[in-house]
């Protein structure tokens, strides 16, 4: 998965759980949960959304890789290659 | 228009999801209503057939306004064979086929039928509540009664069976119930009011008799007078035909209604506050362990444990769970936990998860996920908005360590959970680092005191130390 595809997956997933959130205002190293005001359930739904779109299994211990936008992109693209 | 929270005064019908002639069942979603907080799906509470939609789409109406007329179902319900009156009367009201619905719309049903069924209902009035309702409700044209109003009637000790509705189609309105509950006021024609309200009414030139009181025993208080004055100033203009409230207006209105409700809470409820630190090491370890084996979709979050523990503790300390109104506390058997969810556009909303004490953790997780999702999308259901018996605010997600909440009237307690932090924690003479959370309780001193409140918080902590039993 390329970074662009990964970003698109993230964008679509964010849109599903927080339609009013604007991903363009989030810097690559900003914490998604803080920037977009996601609570723990939103975050879980976000991870579920990523899983549904990519088919990747994301164990709970990997959640910390998904806290920032840059982290999400590299996690999705590297895991897809592995 | 159901009251979807104590702070709601009016709502706009955005969309009807049923049409006259449609058969509806208890729990069906029949309309979408816009309030300041959210769009809310209104559920129906009886089985029947939609007769007439009384409020067109786009119209804003006050709480208590009948939205639709519902006719008794054409077929007698199989579960009521013991009520011969219902079985006989029901077919008489709505003969077979959809055609007879039309006369029922323009003519609130043949009086003879109605009278007869009422009388037979009276004659059959049994002490058993369920039987009485089944006798009264099905044969008459539906007297649209939201559970909120039933609840109100229960609280005020008003017998709905003996009440005449003044709304269209003899529908019982909030006013009817309140009037029935205050016979002394009606008899003397005097309006109860506070001295300050009287003085202000005189200054503003408002007739107190026309003001609906929201104070104790329906007394008119200062705020009611002000509200009446505002309404008067705006003129009795017909409701705006368009529902298009701008986002900014909606924001401002939401802020105002939250402000009003919280001001009322602080004015009326003598809050007391307790806090305790709860060791969450068992809970977080247990959670990590069960989640390891689970696919993503069925993993649990800590909030689920917190909610369940709160509900179980509320069951054990009933002074925390229920409604306080008219100087009386009525504990609730069911534990419907309002979950405070912040709206990203600003404001907070606390819809209920029903019967949390009886839900398994998986079920609870599913409901919580669904509730948060629908809150975000603005599609909450009416029952979720109207009946939480206690509220939990979990601000931990935003990073603060403790939240001292303001109680949502007419509830009597609010539990706050802060952020889970790794903290030095001494146990058995040893100092270690453990995940802990600060749990706080805001509770109503008219109902309980610190002793019971402390017991409640301690119980939550105890339950969270044994997560596998939740």
Image: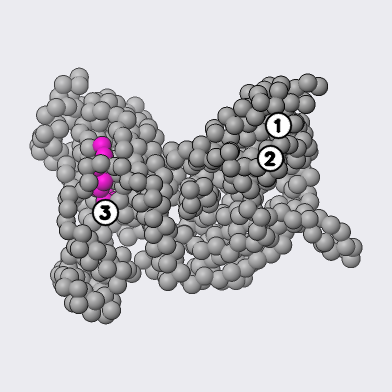
Q: As displayed, is residue B290 above or below residue A55?
A: below
Identify residue for label 2: A28
* Drawn side of residue B264 relative to residue B333, left or right: left
Q: CA distance from mark 2 to mark 1?
A: 9 Å
Element type at marker 2?
A: loop
Q: Please state which of residues B133 and B248 is positioned toward the viewer in this rendering.
A: B248
Where residue B134 sits in the image (x, y, percent)? Answer: 30, 38
Label 2 packing within 10 angstroms: few (<14), some (14-19), many (20+): some
At x 25% / y 48%, what residue is drawn? Answer: B61
* Drawn side of residue B72 relative to residue B252, left or right: left
Tag in front: 3 or 2? 2
- The figure's colour scheme reads one colour
Q: How many marks?
A: 3
Q: Which residues are magenta?
A: B57-66
At x 21% / y 59%, what residue is drawn? Answer: B234
Label 3 chain ID:
B
* Drawn side of residue A57 relative to residue B212, left or right: right
Tag in front: 2 or 1? 2
Q: CA distance from mark 1 to mark 3?
A: 55 Å
At x 55% / y 62%, what residue is drawn? Answer: B405
Give the label on residue B174, or none.
3
Give the label on residue A73, or none.
1
Labels 2 and 1: the sequence-earlier one: 2
Quadrant in which the C terminus of chain B is drawn: top right
Is residue B270 visible in the rendered structure shown here? yes
Q: Please state which of residues B32 and B154 is positioned toward the viewer in this rendering.
A: B32
């Amino acid at each position: 998965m390329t970074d662009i595809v990964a970003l698109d997956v993230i964008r679509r997933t964010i849109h599903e759980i927080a339609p009013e959130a604007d991903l363009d205002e989030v810097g690559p190293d900003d914490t998604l949960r803080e920037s977009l005001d996601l609570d723990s359930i939103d975050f879980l739904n976000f991870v579920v959304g990523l899983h549904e779109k990519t088919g990747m299994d994301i164990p709970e211990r990997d959640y910390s890789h998904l806290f920032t936008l840059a982290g999400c992109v590299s996690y999705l693209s590297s895991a897809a290659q592995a | 228009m159901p009251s979807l929270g104590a702070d709601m005064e009016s709502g706009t019908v955005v969309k009807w999801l049923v049409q006259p002639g449609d058969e509806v069942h208890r729990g069906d979603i029949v309309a979408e209503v816009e309030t300041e907080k959210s769009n809310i799906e209104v559920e129906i509470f009886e089985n029947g057939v939609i007769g007439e939609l009384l409020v067109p789409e786009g119209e804003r109406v006050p709480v208590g306004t009948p939205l639709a007329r519902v006719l008794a179902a054409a077929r007698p319900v199989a579960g009521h064979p013991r009520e011969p009156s219902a079985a006989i009367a029901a077919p008489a009201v709505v003969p077979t086929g959809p055609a007879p619905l039309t006369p029922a719309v323009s003519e609130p049903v043949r009086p003879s039928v109605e009278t007869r069924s009422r009388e037979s209902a009276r004659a059959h009035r049994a002490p058993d509540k369920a039987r009485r309702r089944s006798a009264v409700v099905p044969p008459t044209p539906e007297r649209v009664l939201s559970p909120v109003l039933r609840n109100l009637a229960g609280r005020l000790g008003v017998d709905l069976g003996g009440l005449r509705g003044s709304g269209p189609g003899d529908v019982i309105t909030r006013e009817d119930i309140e009037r029935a509950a205050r016979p002394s006021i009606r008899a003397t024609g005097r309006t109860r009011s506070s001295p300050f309200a009287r003085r202000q009414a005189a200054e503003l030139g408002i007739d107190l008799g026309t003001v609906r009181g929201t104070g104790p025993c329906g007394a008119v208080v200062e705020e009611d007078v002000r509200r009446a004055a505002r309404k008067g100033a705006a003129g009795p203009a017909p409701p705006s035909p368009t529902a298009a409230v701008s986002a900014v207006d909606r924001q401002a209105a939401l802020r105002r209604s939250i402000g009003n409700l919280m001001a009322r809470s602080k004015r009326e409820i003598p809050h007391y506050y307790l806090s305790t630190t709860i060791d969450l090491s068992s809970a977080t370890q247990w959670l990590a362990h069960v989640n390891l084996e689970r696919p993503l979709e069925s993993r649990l979050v800590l909030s689920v444990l917190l909610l369940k523990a709160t509900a179980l503790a509320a069951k054990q300390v009933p002074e925390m769970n229920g409604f306080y109104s008219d100087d009386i506390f009525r504990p609730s058997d069911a534990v419907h936990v309002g979950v405070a969810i912040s709206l990203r556009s600003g404001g907070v909303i606390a819809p209920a998860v029903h019967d949390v004490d009886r839900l398994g953790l998986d079920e609870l997780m599913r409901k919580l996920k669904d509730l948060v999702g629908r809150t975000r999308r603005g599609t909450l259901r009416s029952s979720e908005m109207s009946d939480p018996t206690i509220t939990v605010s979990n601000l931990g997600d935003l990073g603060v360590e403790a939240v001292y909440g303001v109680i949502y009237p007419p509830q009597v307690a609010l539990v706050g959970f802060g952020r889970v932090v790794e903290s030095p924690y001494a146990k058995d003479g040893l100092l270690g680092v453990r995940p802990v959370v600060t749990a706080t309780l805001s509770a109503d001193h008219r109902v309980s005191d610190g002793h019971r409140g402390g017991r409640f918080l301690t119980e939550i902590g105890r339950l969270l130390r044994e997560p596998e039993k939740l």
